[in-house]
Image (spheres, rainbow, N blue to C red):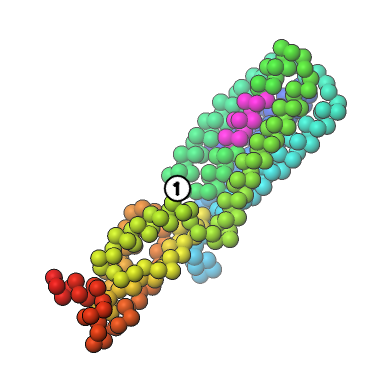
Amino acid sequence: MGLAATIGLTALKLGVGIASGSVGVLSEAIHSFLDLISAGVTFYTAPHSIKPADEDHPFGHGKFETISSLFEALLLVIAAVMIFYEALNHFHHLQAIEYPGLAMAVIGVSIVISYWVYRQNSVASAQVDSRALRVNALHFLSDVVASVGVFAGLVLLKFTGWLWIDPAIAIVVALYILFVAGTQVKFALDELSDSQLPEAEVREIRKILDGFRDRTIDAHDLRTRKSGSFRHVDFHLVVCGELTVEQSHEICDEIEQAILALYSEALVSIHVEPCRHVRGADCHLTCPIYQKRMKS
């Protein structure tokens, strides 16, 4: 749906932009064209990113989505540069806009359609936690904001006759798109460089681990990262050395289920370690878990 809408918007804006001579409308055509490429990339990569792990990709295919989101964000950078260049060129060659009413009508339709597609992609990205869909949604959101700016510029131009308003609005649009793109590039690079999950998410995971302190000794070396919609969580879990393998495994299963209840696409890896005094003569004196078991 987003792909079809983008094709129609691109063709409409390009035709009216050339006919009217408005750099604002033309900049929106450039923006929509790159949105078209972005939607196509998302359409191709989204199904691949959720494929299960295989022999060639033992950690899954989530990075396909991250690479896709980075590519889409870089497209926004290209759009901003192209719009900025066209705006500066029009500043030096100010000209009256032909068919201002038609230009405003096209931009108005663009605002409605782009916002509708943004909402569709935004809901979908939230449901599957997809970075690529989120960036694609932001493409359309930036298109909405940019179109509102262009529409306001066309209205002012119609009533004031100030020809410089058209390229000035285009420059503001370019700077806004560049800001949005920069934010998304940072997110994508963080994922590709295996940065840890956001601090708020790490705190939630630590809270789960603390909830098992009555049955474990310690949880340390917590490492987290994100790959597409998948969160990778691994840590070392210290348990009483008197526990059997089966008992230790049951605790790990419960911890894993608690994390999955919070993040359904999490991949949890737990390395179990016995407490330092493993089955030694002093275990009953030093291991708090062992002491609790003996008292109960």
> Dot 1, how many residues are within 10 Å of its Cα: few (below 14), some (14-19), or many (20+)?
few
Q: Residue at x 36, y 53 (%)?
A: 262
Picture quarter with the C terminus = bottom left
Is residue 19 rendered to the left or right of residue 284? Answer: right
Q: Quadrant of residue 2?
A: top right
Please say whether residue 146 is one of the residues in the magenta stretch.
yes
Name the spot of residue 158 as percent of width and height, x first.
72, 14
Is residue 169 in view from this perspective?
A: yes
> Which residue is at the far front?
285
| Residue type marked 1 | Val
Query: Left or right: 251 with respect to 27?
Result: left
What's the magenta region? Answer: 140-150
Pointer 1 residue = 128
Q: Residue at x 23, y 87 (%)?
A: 281
Q: Secondary structure at mark 1?
A: helix
Horizontal relation, residue 89 to residue 125: left or right:
right
Question: Residue 55: where, in percent of width, then height?
Answer: 51, 70
Using the image, determine if residue 91 lies above or below residue 98. Answer: below
Residue farthest to the top?
A: 159
Q: Quadrant of residue 194?
A: bottom right
288 on left or right of 125? left
